Image (cartoon, rainbow, N blue to C red):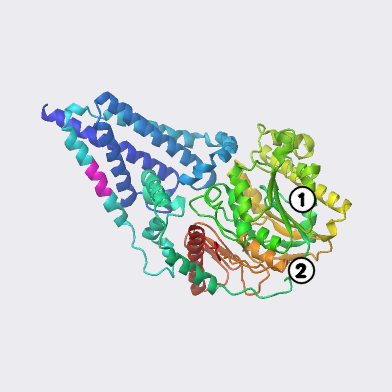
Amino acid sequence: MDKTEQKRAWLGVFTAVLPFWLLDLTLRAMAGSAGYYALYAAAPNLFSLGFGALFAALCLALPRRAGRIAYGVCYALWAVYAVVQYGVWRIFDRFLFLSDFLFAGEGLGFLGYVRQLLDLRFAFFVLLLIVWGAFGVWRLPAGGALPRRRVCDGLALFFALTQFAAPRCYASVPETLDWDAWQSSGYEYRKFASSSYDMALTGPYQFVARDAFLSLAPDADEEAALAEIEAFLAERPARQDNEMTGLLRGKNLIMVQLESIDDFVLNEENTPTMARLMREGVNFTNFYTPQYANGYTFNTEFAAQTGLYPYANGNVAYSLSRSAFPDTLAHLLRQAGYAANSFHKSEAKFYNRGAMHRAFGYEGYHSALDYAANETEAGTDRFLADCDELYEKMIESQPFFDFIITYSGHLGYDERDALTTYALERYPEYLDPARPYEISGLFAKARLTDELFERLLERLTEDGLLENTVFFVYDDHYAYGLTDRAVLETYSAQAGGALLERTPCFFWYPGCTPTTVSKTLQTIDILPTLANLYGLPEPRTPGRDAFDSAYPGWAVFPDGTWMTDKAYVKNGAVEWNHGMTEEEIAQMNAYARRLAHVGDAILDTDYYRGR
């Protein structure tokens, strides 16, 4: 073989590595990763070049035809992964961790987004990936044109060197975490909790590899984790009795988690019954539902039940069903003599609710699908109150605690969704040609949820139970099921929310004094607030009682972003500040990090078992 052929073959080796790096660069560039970490930074580029070398080595070790097929298959798999992640980022402004794929079934409901994604930008992204892959297959050199073993060994060595060198390109981890430690790329790489930041730090190949490693790695020192938990809970001020302590003691409780009934959805026009209860009840006007990982509905459910947030980069529905949660509301109320049952449309295996709700302390989980004639009937929230068998389970023992998860507001909202069609046929007045069809669908489906409240009030009144019953209502997440993000943001802004994550939360009972609570609150505050209202022991969780005068109120999000009544800090940058000092902001930054650490430690160690 002459020198010209050798040079061409060696160039082919390089160009076989290049497409994998270009795939990474295309994904990071088009997904806005530069906002987190520079595209030209050494670490992600080294990682991707190293993995490209590894994949090329594996393919070059095969005969030429087999090598090209293997190369094409390998690249195609990563290209599909990149397309999925890019699509998810376009919808949710985040990427999927490996554990998120456990919720793939829920993702089928997002098929309506496909039409929104198939624009020139998305087509350009896919086209670039195809071009890079075709170029790599074409340029992959013949195995016989090179000293195959030496080349493959060299590529594998390069991969190993990049694995050693790339993590050392990140900023060092601060010795203390008292200030903005999250801004250290080394700290985030170690923690690996913010998918958008992590993809920017690593690129797709190392993103998957590190996520898998952390998922399989043995737990950290349990004694140190337990000490951290104990210190955090000890530093939290003990709840002091206040004017709301024991206010609802002995009353029946119907706790309702709404599906997608956003702050701009719940109003006199769309949900007249709920709007009346909110107006006549105690209304938390600055309540936020941070979205942790995928499976947003269940993760909010978990937070409200346990006073803990789930893992930022993982799931809890399938991993913690055997963990102990003795301080949940169901456990505390059952200890006080209550019956506790939960109700929803979906079957028990969905989100592993059958097992998880037992862990939460419920005596039974009841699915409407077990009683309804078809999917549409089961998905109509009113059915939970209309069905005599289900209603009897709600009230058969007193005092009772019923947890209801609504369904009617679930995405999608377009013409292909059967429940949307049903809702608009039932309430054709919501079909307004002056606004997007999806908005009309969302509003009509919200009216179906409102029928549940209307019917429950009727039946409880007929049975003489309403006078001793409380409704506590909150939302699972903002209406992210709207495929047009601009429309969502416009309606949310018109409702006055500072963030998309602001959602309704209120409670009502006959004779309630209408009250507005403007303190900034979050999902994990629901449990301690209800515990105080019912005169129950204070739960040993990071959440706080909304009526505790020592609690100023805040909402903390999984990437370390946080909000109080006075300030909003996103990705370490102060978006607005109306009176917090630099020291107070630093303290809140530290608290946001500790909340994540302690929450994960409680879950990792099954902290409550035996305590």
Q: Give the quadrant of residue 609.
A: bottom right
Inspect the magenta stretch and tell me whether residue 158 lies in it: yes
| Residue type indicated by callout 1 | Met
Residue, disc 1: 394
Q: How many marks?
A: 2
- Quarter of the view holding residue 335: bottom right
Name the front one of labels 1 and 2: 1
Q: Kindly identify the residue that appears in the image at 50 percent across and 70 percent down.
A: 230
Q: Which residues are magenta?
A: 156-162
Closer to the camera in the image, 293 or 541: 541
SS class, disc 1: helix
For the stretch drawn in magenta, what is the main secondary structure? helix
Residue ID for mark 2:
247
Q: Is residue 76 above or below residue 471?
A: above
Q: Is residue 500 visible?
A: no
Separation of residues labelled 1 and 2 (CA atoms): 22 Å
Relative image position of residue 227 (x, y in whole percent): 46, 69
Residue depicted at 18% across the width and 32% down the height: 148
Residue under the image location 84 percent in, 52 percent down:
460
Q: Dot 1, how many residues are within 10 Å of its Cα: few (below 14), some (14-19), or many (20+)?
A: many
Q: Amino acid at mark 2?
A: Leu
